[in-house]
């Protein structure tokens, strides 16, 4: 399978001297195009730090990270911002929707930021995604009026808005009841299957992990399984 991203010998250290904490300790990982993988490990294992680096929101202390053939360690902040907006989507445990925006406005927001305005083409893409998420009756609802499961489905649609090759999901079902969680995971699996989007899903839920084709276990700053 073709590699989408590769990290090798990744270190991340916070602080210095007696306060130094080494979170990643030479971690290496490859994700293939179209994979749907779960990221597992106890609290403090380095999962969140790894996701933050893969999302280009933080640079490693040392090591290599390439995605789509681009070196993302040496790239400057402007290049990283553009790369992130075009190629990476994010879904968080807390949906982080803008409460005064409608569902559609939240979904279209990443493209509006990139283009400097909200276009009709973007609005049509946003509507299509919300219909796919089963939210055709909630397109123009203020996000504050949506249920938790509906908000998370809006968040998934937002992550897909710019057709990213990679979606990073950090405990995307952590605040949902089981039925809502399964609905969100079904939608993620459908997108992965139909569009070939790569998903890396950090979770503590073994049931959620079992729905992914691959389980990546992180412990003490390294991939251990």
Image: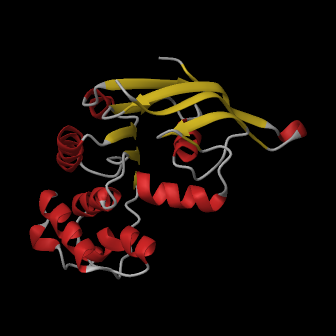
Vertical placement of residue 26 versus 103, above or below: above
Vertical placement of residue 18 versus 143, above or below: above
Vertical placement of residue 188 versus 153, above or below: above
Residue 168 place in picture, x, y as percent = 42, 46
Vertical placement of residue 85 versus 39, above or below: below
User: Between residues 136 and 70, which one lies in front from this camera angle?
Assistant: 70
Q: Residue at x 38, y 82 (%)?
A: 117
User: Between residues 8 and 168, which one lies in front from this camera angle?
Assistant: 8
Res 157 → quadrant: bottom left
Residue 203 place in picture, x, y as percent = 40, 37
Q: Residue at x 10, y 68 (%)?
A: 136
User: Between residues 204 and 110, which one lies in front from this camera angle?
Assistant: 110
Q: Viewed as shown, does residue 219 lie left or right of 117?
A: right
Question: Which residue extends farthest top?
Answer: 225
Asked whether the viewer can see residue 1, the reply is: yes
Q: Viewed as shown, does residue 57 lie left or right of 186?
A: right
- For the N terminus, the image quarter is top left
Q: Residue at x 67, y 55 (%)?
A: 76
């Amino acid at each position: 399978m073709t590699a989408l991203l590769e990290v090798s010998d990744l270190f991340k250290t916070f602080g210095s001297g007696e306060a130094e904490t080494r979170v990643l300790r030479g971690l290496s990982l490859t994700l293939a195009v179209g994979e749907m993988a779960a990221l597992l490990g106890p609290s403090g294992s380095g999962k969140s730090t790894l996701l933050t680096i893969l999302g280009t929101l933080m640079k490693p202390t040392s090591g290599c990270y390439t995605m789509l053939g681009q070196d993302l360690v040496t790239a400057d902040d402007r290049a990283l911002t553009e790369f992130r907006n075009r190629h990476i989507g994010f879904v968080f445990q807390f949906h982080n929707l803008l409460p005064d925006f409608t569902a559609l406005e939240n979904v279209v927001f990443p493209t509006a930021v990139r283009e400097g305005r909200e276009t009709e083409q973007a609005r049509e893409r946003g509507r299509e995604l919300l219909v796919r998420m089963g939210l055709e009756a909630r397109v123009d609802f203020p996000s504050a009026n949506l249920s938790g499961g509906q908000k998370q489905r809006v968040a998934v649609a937002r992550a897909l808005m710019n057709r990213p090759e990679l979606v990073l999901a950090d405990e995307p079902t952590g605040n949902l009841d089981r039925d809502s969680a399964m609905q969100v995971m079904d939608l993620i699996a459908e997108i992965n299957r139909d569009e070939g989007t790569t998903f890396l899903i950090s979770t503590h839920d073994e049931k959620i992990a079992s729905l992914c084709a691959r389980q990546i276990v992180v412990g003490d700053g390294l991939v251990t399984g």
